[in-house]
Amino acid sequence: MCTTCGCGSDGATIDHHHAGHPYVARRRGIAAPAAAAAPGAETGPGRTADAAESAVAASAAAHLRQVSIEQDLLARNDAEAVANRRAFAEAGVFALNLVSSPGSGKTTLLVKTIERLAGRVPVAVIEGDQQTSNDAERIRATGAPATQINTGKGCHLDARMVGDATASLPLARGGLLMIENVGNLVCPAAFDLGEAHKVVILSVTEGEDKPLKYPDMFRAADLMLLNKCDLLPYLQFDVEQAEAYARRVNPDIRIIRVSATSGLGMDEWMEWLAAGASACDAAAPALEQV
Amino acid sequence: MHELSLAESAIALIEDAGRRESFHRVRVVRMEIGALSCVEPEALRFAFESASHGSCAEGARLDILPIPGEGECAACGIRAEMETAYDLCPQCESRPLKVVRGTEMRVKDLDVE
């Protein structure tokens, strides 16, 4: 067990960087799949006669009562996300949840973004991957503080992991918190982390129809960055078609064509980020004189 | 496999209810799952069996109550069934319908003893 925070030993780990020991978030362990042993639900070899069985079932049914629950499966995550959102608003931080397939160029885009914002807008980063801290190390090489969350078998970040990870990150007022989710266009769509916006990154080396294949993610995002546009001359990728598919799924989505490598579109992306960060700064409660 | 996280959330909700309502064994769990939600019912079923292990819902039967997708057109106002979250309005074909039903992922109720 982690002696810093009292977390358990299963599930997701959050790299405390500064402390040099693995942080293990307080998450429930997951048992291996086992055959269900539902009394009365399965008839297998060695069972008693039908009559005896139905007598048992009738006796059990007499003790059954119905309990109303009426709760959303995401209720707990959503409650943690609300707490994160409140903390980000109080800190005056513009938090973004970056989602995409693996290999869309999220980390390179993030590195180039941090380099361009250096000296103007402070950036802190949470990196989510199943394994390795390679991405957090790439971010730290730019000078920005970064925390790596390894989700283990998990396919997405959840609000509690992000809440735990932000505890060890300096969040500067008027700054950005970039949360790079696990590369996956399916699962992260459902999990609110408390971000201001989801930003989906689609690269032109993927198919134009990704927005139709993974509509939940493109519907959940407010901004789409169409990345690697410097490669368009070498590819059969129909930009207008890809953008039309994204707008079919989400008519309100904003789209910026970018290339982290050539710099194309990066000014527009920087403007969008700076505007969001200054709006969060302006909306945050006045700094208290202590 | 976000269904595993969702199944774990369901078990947590059920165990909370068990403490509140003083039951120790769950026989049937009824969940409402919308056609436009991000849940694959068979994956949820598999995940539920795994996540329920060692809980008061271990061995419980999971009944999934499907809820069809339904949307409304912002332009002409008609309501129509939706198969995908980006179905166009069948009448005016101007914009995707706005989803009004079918994204539910809820634990509805339980049979307990």
Image (cartoon, coloured by chain):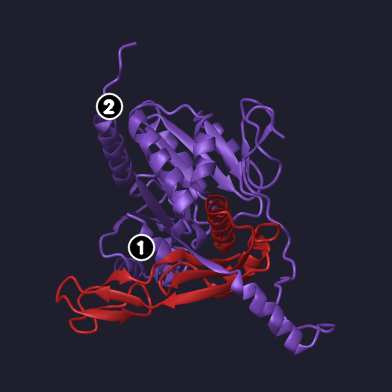
Chain colours: A purple, B red
Task: Check if mark 2 and mark 1 are on a common chain.
Answer: yes
* A137 versus B77 height, above or below: above
Is residue A46 among what the camera can see?
A: yes
Q: Residue at x 52, y 43 (%)?
A: A160
- The residue wearing badge 2 is A285
Task: Give how far across and how far down residue A90 sits, in percent.
Answer: 34, 30
Mark found first going from the N terminus, 2 or 1: 1
* A279 versus B44 height, above or below: above
Q: Amino acid at mark 2?
A: Pro
Considering every residue shown, the one lying at the far top of the view is: A290
Q: Amino acid at mark 1?
A: Arg
Most foreground residue, A102 or A46: A46
Tag 2 and tag 1, C-beta contact below 8 Å: no
Assess disc 2: are there few (<14), some (14-19) or many (≥20) residues with their C-alpha within 10 Å of its C-alpha.
few
- Quadrant in the picture for the N terminus of chain B: bottom right
Mark 2 falls within which chain?
A
Mark 2 falls on what kind of element? loop
Q: Residue at x 38, y 80 (%)?
A: B83
Is residue A41 among what the camera can see?
A: no
- The residue wearing badge 1 is A219
Task: Give how far across and how far down residue A140 sits, in percent.
Answer: 55, 32
